[in-house]
Image (spheres, helix red, strand yellow):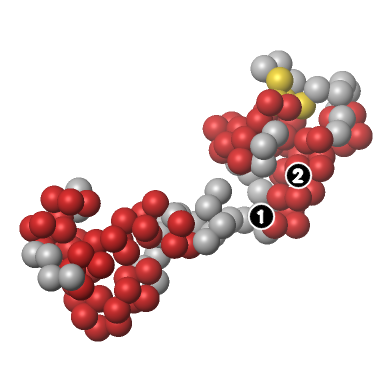
């Protein structure tokens, strides 16, 4: 995961578009160069004129705020690094269902099967989830 906001692809693209606008490129040129709609580029132009590139970088990147803080993610990573039996499961193997159950028990957050797998993968531990059902 990118560590700085400016490194996120969507923000980097906005900033490149903003630089082009500051250098005098037309709305159409910027739209073509960055595969943006002219309406989006017009919005960017107004923001850049009012507050510079900082105003453009400050636009929300979307998505909702994570329900789990960094400490919770660290705890999950440690749990996945060990045995599932340490958390009350009948065998050592971690499965997607067990991970979701553990997160729900510990943090009261319920994730889909897909998101739980993405979370484990983002933590570098997707390989720890076996394909077994339970």
Q: Where's residue 17, x and y in %?
A: 24, 61
Q: Does 79 sit above or below residue 74?
A: above
Which quadrant of the figure has residue 104? top right
**Residue 37 in sight in this render:** no
Q: Could you say whether the residue bearing mark 2 is in a helix, strand or loop?
A: helix
Q: Could you say whether the residue bearing mark 1 is in a helix, strand or loop?
A: loop
Which quadrant of the figure has residue 83? top right
Q: Are marks 1 and 2 in contact (CB under 8 Å)?
A: yes
Which quadrant of the figure has residue 28? bottom left
Q: Which residue is mark 2?
A: 76
Mark 2 nearby-residue class (10 Å; few <14, some 14–19, many ≥20): many
User: As rendered, which of 101 and 37 lies closer to the eye?
Assistant: 37
Give me the residue at 12% from left, 65% from top.
25
Q: Where's residue 94, x and y in %?
A: 77, 27
Q: Does 54 sit above or below residue 25?
A: below
User: As rendered, which of 46 and 106 lies closer to the eye?
Assistant: 46
Q: Does 78 sit above or below residue 22?
A: above
Q: Earlier in the sequence, mark 1 or mark 2?
A: 1
Give me the residue at 74% from left, 53% from top.
72
Q: On residue 68, which mark appears?
A: 1
Mark 1 nearby-residue class (10 Å; few <14, some 14–19, many ≥20): few
Q: Where's residue 113, x and y in %?
A: 59, 31
């Amino acid at each position: 995961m990118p560590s700085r906001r400016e490194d996120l692809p969507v923000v980097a693209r906005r900033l490149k578009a903003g630089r082009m606008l500051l250098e005098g490129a037309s709305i159409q040129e910027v739209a073509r160069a960055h595969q943006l709609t002219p309406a989006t580029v017009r919005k960017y132009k107004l923001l850049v004129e009012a507050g510079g590139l900082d105003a453009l970088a400050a636009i929300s990147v979307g998505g909702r705020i994570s329900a789990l803080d960094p400490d919770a993610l660290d705890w999950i990573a440690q749990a996945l690094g060990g045995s599932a039996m340490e958390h009350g499961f009948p065998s050592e193997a971690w499965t997607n269902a067990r991970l979701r159950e553990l997160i729900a028990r510990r943090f009261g957050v319920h994730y889909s099967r897909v998101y739980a797998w993405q979370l484990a993968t983002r933590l570098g531990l997707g390989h720890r989830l076996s394909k077994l059902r339970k």
